[in-house]
Image (spheres, grey):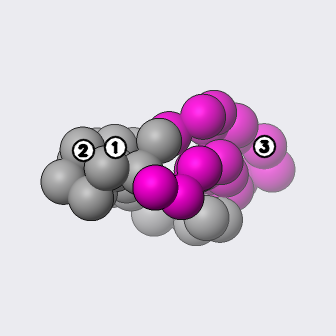
Amino acid sequence: VITTDPGAKADIPAFCNRTGHQLLEVVEEGGKIIFYLKKK
């Protein structure tokens, strides 16, 4: 998931907790926030 929304830093981990997906890594670069997820 790629976003520029700073609120995603809270939203994506909460989404993973609710759905059972695994958050593998979060990378911030060039004004973007990149979330690497592993699907349940």
Q: Residue at (50%, 39%) from the top-left corner? A: 23
Contact flag, marks 1 and 2 (Cβ < 8 Å): yes
The magenta-colored residue range is: 23-40
Q: How far apart are labels 3 and 1 at the CA level?
A: 19 Å
Question: Residue 6's spot in the image, x, y percent?
Answer: 42, 52
Q: Residue at (58%, 50%) from the top-left corner? A: 37
Q: Residue 24 lies in what quarter of the image?
A: top right
Label 1 neighbourhood size at 10 Å, few (<14), some (14-19), many (20+)? Answer: some
Q: Upstream in the sequence, badge 2 or badge 3?
A: 2
Label 2 neighbourhood size at 10 Å, few (<14), some (14-19), many (20+)? Answer: few
Q: Amino acid at mark 1?
A: Pro
In this rendering, would 10 be left or right of 23? left
Q: Amino acid at mark 3?
A: Glu
Foreground tag (3 vs 1): 1
Callout 1 secondary element: helix
**Residue 33 falls within the magenta-colored stretch:** yes
Q: Amino acid at mark 2?
A: Asn
Q: How far apart are labels 2 and 3 at the CA level?
A: 24 Å
Q: Which residue is mark 3?
A: 29
Q: Quadrant of the N terminus?
A: bottom right
Question: Residue 29's spot in the image, x, y percent?
Answer: 78, 43
Q: Which residue is mark 1?
A: 13
- The label shown at residue 24 is none
Q: How far apart are labels 1 and 2 at the CA level?
A: 6 Å
Question: Residue 16's spot in the image, x, y percent?
Answer: 34, 50
Callout 3 secondary element: strand
Q: Which residue is mark 2?
A: 17
* Residue 11, visible in the rendered structure: no
**Residue 16 falls within the magenta-colored stretch:** no
